[in-house]
Image (cartoon, helix red, strand yellow):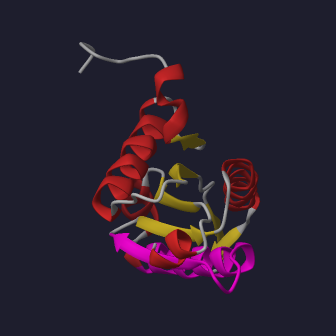
Amino acid sequence: MHRAQREQAPLTVAMIDIDHFKQFNDQYGHDAGDALLRELAVIFREHLRQSDLACRYGGEEFVFILPGVNRATAQTRLQRLRETVQRRQIAFAGQLLGPVTVSIGFVVSESDDQNAHLIIQHADAALYAAKRSGRNQAVDFANLHLLPSDEGNE
């Protein structure tokens, strides 16, 4: 974040969640779930630059920190990542697993006044919007007002 501020460059933060991971583990077992996580790490490495950071945020959630990535580039890269996960044939113990999809929420911060906690909250809000509106998609926090509201439907 400090580097992005110093260089006056955008900073994209994305939260990624494996869709229906609990059901995946229930169906195939935890060893298969571990194999899936390892395969996702390979996919992440294929899609990230050396300057990008990927962190496991919790169970099946990950955070990407993409310094210097603007909104258009973030949308393109994250959609490509999502499509790669969806197409990947993942095998474990002689059987194909899946299909596997991910939901992604991201925020692009271009301001000098960046707040790490708020950026994570915004990426998380975009992730949950992606999940609420059907999963297997990447949602930009800046576009949340364009999604149908589900207020009162909970």
Q: Is residue 81 above or below residue 57?
A: above
The residue stretch that appears in magenta = 31-58
154 horizontally vs 44: left or right = left
- 55 in the magenta segment: yes
- Residue 122 is situated, as x and y percent measured from the top left of the image, at 38, 47
What residue lies at 64% left-to-right and 75% top-to-bottom? 44
- Residue 126 is situated, as x and y percent measured from the top left of the image, at 44, 42
Q: State the image quarter where residue 53 is shown.
A: bottom right
- Residue 70 is situated, as x and y percent measured from the top left of the image, at 68, 55
- 56 in the magenta segment: yes
Could one spot residue 92 in this view of the protein?
no
What residue lies at 68% left-to-right and 76% top-to-bottom? 48
Nearest to the observer: residue 16 or residue 34: 16
Q: State the image quarter where residue 9 is shown.
A: bottom right
Which image quarter is the C terminus in?
top left
What residue lies at 58% left-to-right and 80% top-to-bottom? 41
Q: Is residue 148 above or below residue 13?
A: above
39 horizontally vs 134: left or right = right
Q: Residue furthest bottom?
A: 50
121 horizontally vs 145: left or right = left
Nearest to the observer: residue 2 or residue 101: 2
Q: State the image quarter where residue 137 is shown.
A: top right
Nearest to the observer: residue 120 or residue 148: 120
Could one spot residue 123 in this view of the protein?
yes
Q: Is residue 120 above or below residue 7?
A: above
- Residue 81 is situated, as x and y percent measured from the top left of the image, at 70, 60
Image label count = 0
What residue lies at 60% left-to-right and 58% top-to-bottom? 98
